[in-house]
Structures are given as structure tokens and as C-alpha cells.
Image (tube, rainbow, N blue to C red):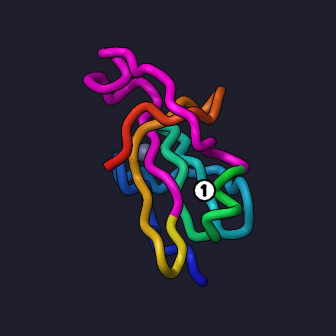
Amino acid sequence: MKVMYQQCPACNSKEAEKLDPKIRQCAHCGCVYGCCTIRHTRRYVLDEWEPGTQDMLNNNSIPYDFWLIDLKYRIHGWFNPTTGRITQTG
Ligand SMILES: [Zn+2]
């Protein structure tokens, strides 16, 4: 496995904090991205829904989070980084 993105897939920023050897969190928009197993994603994103706010979906300055990729699955969407709950997937 490798880190597939060299920059944030949401905003293209290259500044990021390393959360795990293959996982980064964008310093600009809060996006979490990288490469790991589905089981490992549960450290960051739960299998539970949370209502989104209009600001979260419309305003790029509000944390806007992609998430994690492994060799078989590509998952992305928005979630609340504080609670880990999903607002939208796509
Ligand atoms: Zn970003």
C-alpha cells in the first residue's frame, strides 16, 4: 500500500499532519486522506449517520473531509471529525 495523494484531494494543499504512517489530515481544510484497510477507517469514521448543516456542505472553510482508500475500496464523503459520524457519502 502507498499514500495515493501527494496533496489534499479536496483543496490541493500540501500542508498536512501525519495521523498514521499512511494517513494525513489536511492543515487547510481538515480533509483526512490516505491508504488503509476498511477496518482501520473505523478509527476515524464510524458507521453512523449525523445530520449535516448547510454551512458544512456549502462552505469550503468548514472542515470538509474526504476519507480513506485501500486496495479494494475507495470511500469518500463528509463526516464530522469530532464525532466521526457520517453526513454524506458519494
Ligand atoms: Zn484540504
Q: Measured from the top left, where is residue 80 in percent x and y?
A: 54, 29
Could you say which is closer to the camera, residue 16 or residue 85? Answer: 85
Label 1 belongs to which residue? 24
Could you say which quadrant of the image residue 52 lies in? top left
Residue drawn at x 58%, y 48% as measured from the top left:
25
Looking at the rendered structure, the number of numbered marks drawn on it comes to 1
Q: Measured from the top left, where is residue 43 in percent x and y?
A: 72, 49
In the displayed structure, does residue 77 sit left or right of residue 27?
left
Residue drawn at x 54%, y 49% as measured from the top left:
32
Q: Measured from the top left, where is residue 87 in percent x and y?
A: 43, 31
- Please report the bounds of the magenta region as a residue range: 43-68
What element does badge 1 sit on? strand
Could you say which is closer to the camera, residue 24 or residue 57? Answer: 57
In the rendered image, the vertical position of residue 39 relative to residue 55, given as above or below: below
Q: Main secondary structure of the magenta part?
A: loop
Q: Measured from the top left, where is residue 23 in percent x and y?
A: 63, 61
Q: Quadrant of ligand 1?
A: top left
Residue drawn at x 64%, y 56% as measured from the top left:
41
Could you say which is closer to the camera, residue 28 or residue 37? Answer: 37
